[in-house]
Image (cartoon, rainbow, N blue to C red):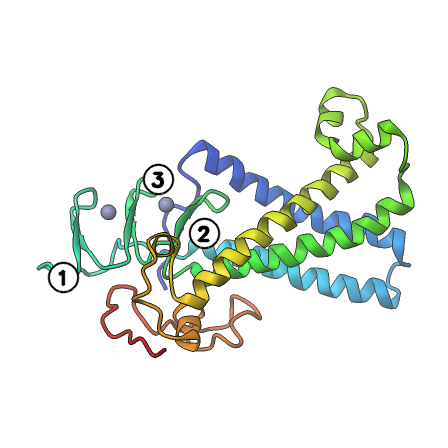
Amino acid sequence: MKIRKRILPRVASDLGAFLFVLLIIPVTYCFELFIVLPALHSVWSFWYTLHFICATYVMVNVTSNFVAVVVVDTSLQNIVTASSQPENWRYCTECETVAPPRSWHCDTCKTCILKRDHHCMFTGCCVGHYNYRYFYMFLLYVFIGTFYSTYLNCFYIWKNFEHFSLLGITKFIFPMAMLVLGVDATEKQVCLLIFIINFVGAIFTLVLLVHHTSLVCKGMVTHEKSKNITYYDSGLKKNLSQTFGKRWHISWLFPFVASELPNDGTDWNDLQKTD
Ligand SMILES: [Zn+2]
Ligand SMILES: [Zn+2]
């Protein structure tokens, strides 16, 4: 596994999204464990401890998969490419080298990416052959985490907030505006803002998760789906191992679980359509 040398995002919009993720993960985790849960259950009671273990497991997976997406190099750089131009390979004028099928040049990363899916602004890098597994699991665990937080926050907010006044409803819908305008800059308003961020995050990641689950099951990347290229669909089991590695059935437990990919990201000729 190759590690990227430059891990900070290259453009301002990516850097903003990247810093937002770095901030919101620990803020949400601490908010749930130290403010929401103690309001619902006695500290270190059975239910508090169970939530503590589950939340920590999710948080470790969110964080470690995020780090893996960022640091794992899935570019064509440092890969020994053929001196001649093999069949189906193309010449990238930006990288000045031949590049294999399914690779695409990224103008932001300034390199060709193996089995490129897309450039992710939240991680500030491209998602491709070697880091797609971690990206998918990052999405999955962010969805679980935001959905879980929203579930707990609903009980907390119902217990602690005014519900039916016009100002109360406005505060609930526009927490950031209320904070910035100084209408209400209290701790409660910060709680509402975290609730809204997690609620929106759950919907956003659910949409992405549905999209990427469809891609994984069909053995496609986003570009191939838009062009309806089905050539690399090898059947569900092979498609899963092409993304999550040979130990795909346990690879979801942690990103630290070794699961070697069956393909080096350059040679796609041996993929057989099996159904
Ligand atoms: Zn290139
Ligand atoms: Zn990129």
Disc 2 marks which residue? Answer: 70
- Left or right of 13, for residue 185: right
In front of the other: 108 or 52 = 108
- Left or right of 270, for residue 158: right
Q: Position of residue 260 (x, y in %)?
A: 40, 73
Residue kind at label 3, given as amino acid type: Thr
Q: Nearer the viewer, mark 3 or mark 2?
A: 3
Q: Distance between the Cα atoms at labels 2 and 1? A: 27 Å
- In primary-sequence order, the first of circles 3 and 1 is 1
Q: Secondary structure at mark 1?
A: loop
- Asked whether residue 33 is in view, the answer is no
Q: Distance between the Cα atoms at labels 3 and 1? A: 25 Å
In terms of image quadrants, where is residue 187?
Answer: top right
- Look at 82% across and 33% down and name the residue there: 169
- Look at 65% across and 59% down and name the residue there: 144
- Left or right of 248, for residue 143: right
Disc 1 marks which residue? Answer: 82
In front of the other: 269 or 105 = 269
Question: Does 186 appear above or below 29?
Answer: above
Residue kind at label 2, given as amino acid type: Val
Q: Are marks 2 and 1 in contact (CB under 8 Å)?
A: no
- Asked whether residue 173 is in view, the answer is yes
- Which label belongs to residue 108? 3
Q: Residues within 10 Å of mark 3 (few under 14, many from 20)?
A: some
Kindly tell me whether mark 3's CB lies below 8 Å from ligand 2: yes
Residue kind at label 1, given as amino acid type: Ala
Q: Position of residue 155 (x, y in %)?
A: 85, 51
- In primary-sequence order, the first of circles 3 and 2 is 2
